[in-house]
Amino acid sequence: MLEEPLSLNQLPNFYNNEVGLAVLGYPIKHSISPELHAAALKELSEKEPIFRKWKYQKIEVLPNRLAEALPLLSDSGYRGLNLTIPHKVEVLPLLDCIDDQAKVMGAVNTLSWENQGWKGYNTDGAGLSGDIYNAFGKRLKDFNVLVLGAGGASRAAVSQCLMEDCQNLAIYNRSIERASHLSEILRTNGFSQEVLILDQPVNPFADTNSELLIINATSLGLRREDPSPVDLSVFPELVYVYDMVYNPPMTKLLKQAKEKKIPFSNGLGMLVGQAARSLEIWTGRDISENAMRQGAKLALT
């Protein structure tokens, strides 16, 4: 059974070398991040007992309480935070400093308490890139890419695809205005490659020689009753499907991919990869992804 999330009025206080870490989101009940970090911290503490005093939790934070939450957390002794839906973009004006790569992406998923202020980082892109290679044996540069969604998770995915020079890139989002805004941000941040904005989920690159990778960067799939973000029947050619959602491990999108014998992967490996990078930022130590994978498997059984 997964750990229940805390609310802001349930925050503990950390003293005497104790360090609080947490993931913030809404919804957040599905998150297995505490189990991943607990496994890695346990391994670290075998060599350095100080890490026995580090505790990772999940905290439910509504969007309208994020500005209130950050000072409460720092005052309570939290020194590292992960952010998930819907906070990755909205947090930007609340930060004291933003890492250059996160600034280019226009979204953060990791906060570190540094010099008496919160500094933002983004480890999602590296986690996504590594897991796509592990899942499909191909790099982002080998694909045409269709990203579903235009929120904070999409920003990391789109930016990573552009940084790795994917063949072609398109964004489909129900709000064309929001997707166009994301495209404009990318241009402002120095990305010159053309990004197509679609009003329908189709393959605009079907006449090219590269295969299409579909990345679901929406929240559709977090709830078992959610519909699939796209119908894979509209893609007659060979495609690859990557769903950033990891819990539940088989979303409606992935079930359809399996039925159609389409190569697919959920986002568990991405979660592990980005989590390891986050913990490295907070601890200054090398982190074992294997320990986190074992923690994830236990959490999902």
Image (cartoon, rainbow, N blue to C red):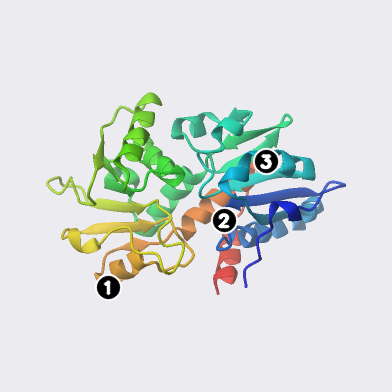
Q: Which mark is residue 68?
A: 3
- Dot 2 surroundings within 10 Å: few (below 14), some, or many (20 or more)? many
Who is closer to the viewer here, 28 or 165? 28
Kind of residue indicated by mark 2: Glu
Q: Indicate the position of residue 15 as horizontal and vertical percent values.
A: 86, 47
Kind of residue indicated by mark 3: Glu
Among numbered discs 1 and 2, the one appearing first in the sequence: 1
Q: Tell me the mark number nearer the camera, choosing from 1 and 3.
A: 3
Give the residue number, with chain letter if any, for mark 1: 259
Give the residue number, with chain letter if any, for mark 2: 289
Give the structural element (helix, strand or loop) at label 3: helix
Q: Are marks 1 and 2 in contact (CB under 8 Å)?
A: no
Q: On the image, which quarter does residue 109 sit in?
A: top right
46 vs 249, left or right, is right
Who is closer to the viewer here, 115 or 6? 6
Q: Residue drawn 33% across and 70% down?
A: 255
Kind of residue indicated by mark 1: Glu
Give the structural element (helix, strand or loop) at label 1: helix
156 vs 237, left or right, is right
Quadrant into which the C terminus falls: bottom right
Query: In this rendering, does residue 220 appear at all?
Result: yes
Q: CA distance from mark 1 to mark 3?
A: 46 Å
Q: Tell me the mark number nearer the camera, choosing from 3 and 2.
A: 3
Q: CA distance from mark 1 to mark 2?
A: 30 Å
Q: Are marks 3 and 2 in contact (CB under 8 Å)?
A: no
Among numbered discs 1 and 3, the one appearing first in the sequence: 3
Who is closer to the viewer here, 176 or 216? 176
